[in-house]
Image (tube, grey):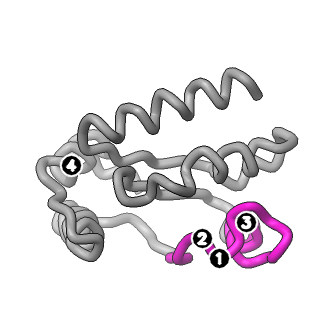
Amino acid sequence: MLSLQRLLDVLVAAAKRQELFVVFDEFSGISKVDGAAGVLRTALQHHYQSLGIVFAGSEPSTMRTRFSVQDQPFFSQADLVEIGPLDDADIYRVVEEGFENTRRAAGAIAGRIVAFAQAHP
C-alpha cells in the first residue's frame, strides 16, 4: 500500500505541472487488492480539476457495482458509460467536450490518446 500511495503522489504532482489524463483499465480488478480502491479514491478525490480520469473495464456488471453500490469507495463518483470501439473522431469529441465541460482546454491530449490507442477498443 505504501508503494501505491507513493505512485499516486507522483501522479498527482505530475497533474499539477502539466495536462494529465489517466485511464485505469480493468478497474474492476481493484477489488483483488484489499483497501486499494479506498487508497485510490482518497489520493485522487480532490484533484479532479487537474487530472482527467477514466475507469475502464470489460466486466460491465462489476464496473457498475464499483460506482453504484453505496459501500464502495467510488460510489456515485463517475458517470457510467458503456461503449464499444470508438473511431478517432469520436475520441477527439469525447475528450475535447470533457475538458470543455470543466472549463479547461484539452490541448494535444486527444491526439495523444488516438495515437496511443491505435484503434484498440
Q: Quadrant of the C terminus?
A: bottom left
Q: Quick one: label 4, few (<14), some, or many (20+) residues within 10 Å?
A: some
Which mark, by number, is residue 109? 4
Q: Amino acid at mark 3?
A: Arg
- Disc 4 and disc 1 in contact, CB within 8 angstroms: no
Residue 97: image quadrant is bottom left
Q: Horizontal placement of 5 versus 21: left or right?
A: right
Q: Which residue is mark 1?
A: 76
How far apart are labels 2 and 1 at the CA level? 4 Å
Q: Earlier in the sequence, mark 4 or mark 3?
A: 3
Residue 5: quadrant of the picture: top right
Identify the residue under disc 3: 66
Q: How many residues crowd mark 1 within 10 Å: few (<14), some (14–19), many (20+)?
A: few
Residue flagged by tag 1: what amino acid is it?
A: Ser
The image shows residue 93 at horizontal and vertical percentages of 20, 71
Quick check: marks 2 and 1 in contact, CB under 8 Å? yes
Magenta extent: 61-81
Relative to 53, residue 90 above or below: below
Seen in the picture, residue 67 relative to 116 is either above or below; the reply is below
Q: Residue 54: where, in percent of width, then height?
A: 47, 57
**Residue visible at 20% across and 72% down?**
100
Separation of residues labelled 4 and 2 (CA atoms): 23 Å
